[in-house]
Amino acid sequence: RMEGEFPLSSDTSGFKDSSDAFVDANIQLAILAAKLLCEEDPSRTVKVVLPDDVEFERASKKFKTSVEMAGPNVSLGCISVKRGLMWALGAGAKAEDATPADIHIAVNASTIELPNVRKYCENVVKDNTFILWCLELDTLRADLGLPMFPNKALHYDFLSGFKPVFYLRQRGYSKSVPVAPFVVNYDGALFRTYPAGWQVMLKQDNGELACIAERPKRYNLGELKEELLEIMGLNTEEKGSNLENLRKGYKRATWWEENEDEEKNKDWRY
């Protein structure tokens, strides 16, 4: 079980085009990845799976030529067929596309659809390779446990078992300083290519990313920011002082970054 995550835009605040443009770009890239995987091993079969039959029908029409050009071993599928008025709450969905494939690539699933992704993984994919493709899992995890959303156990029991094999998350920060220019903006990223460790990257003036810190275990976003502040020389508060505590805040990590003991698997961290 693997995760691939990279930005579809150079904007550190995220993709700002229409949702349809994001969905289509994701599908196109997944089809291309499937094609490359089949070229690497012609005996492989790869299926790009959409969240439901509605998305599948749309993609089948729009990307028919792309799938045909990718070769006979690349196909599209869907995770669930949604029926009834309760489908929006994750109910009334049944995994039906059980066509076998060596590699399954899941794209464009929302938080509500993650339980169906889990069912598909357990009932259809089983021991074959399953890739979560640019789902922005950190954004989806933030909704877990909220009213009308799946509970947090979905991360502890399922999402924690996906190893990030390629991960790039951009972040933009700013800090006030007492001298001109008074506000310093700086950008960075959390980067990982398996089997290498996790790297904190600083965006330089020429737009390139330079590694400033590395370790085997994933950095949480608070640790990422501290590494960037340190290398920029902006970590000016006295260690342990009230000013430092005020800057860092009370919560320095998200619930899924903190509650390590509840996870059934540590793959997402290493």
Image (cartoon, rainbow, N blue to C red):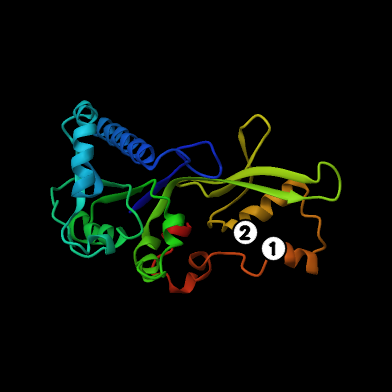
**Mark 2 or 1 closer to N-term?**
2
The three-letter amino acid code for the residue at tag 2 is: Gly
Q: Position of residue 175 (x, y in %)?
A: 73, 50
Residue at x 81% of width, y 46% of height: 182
Q: 244 or 150, which is in the foreground?
A: 150
Q: Furthest residue to the front?
A: 85
> What residue sits right under mark 2 in the picture?
222
Residue at x 57% of width, y 47% of height: 199
- Whether label 2 touches label 1, CB < 8 Å: yes
Horizontal side, residue 123 vs residue 146: left or right: left
Vertical position of residue 141 compared to residue 209: above or below: below
Q: Furthest residue to the bottom?
A: 261
Residue at x 65% of width, y 29% of height: 206
Q: Residues within 10 Å of mark 1 (few under 14, many from 20)?
A: few
Q: Position of residue 50 (x, y in %)?
A: 25, 47
Within the image, what quadrant is residue 151 found in?
A: bottom left
Residue at x 40% of width, y 54% of height: 163
The three-letter amino acid code for the residue at tag 1 is: Lys
Q: Which circle marks residue 248 in the picture?
A: 1
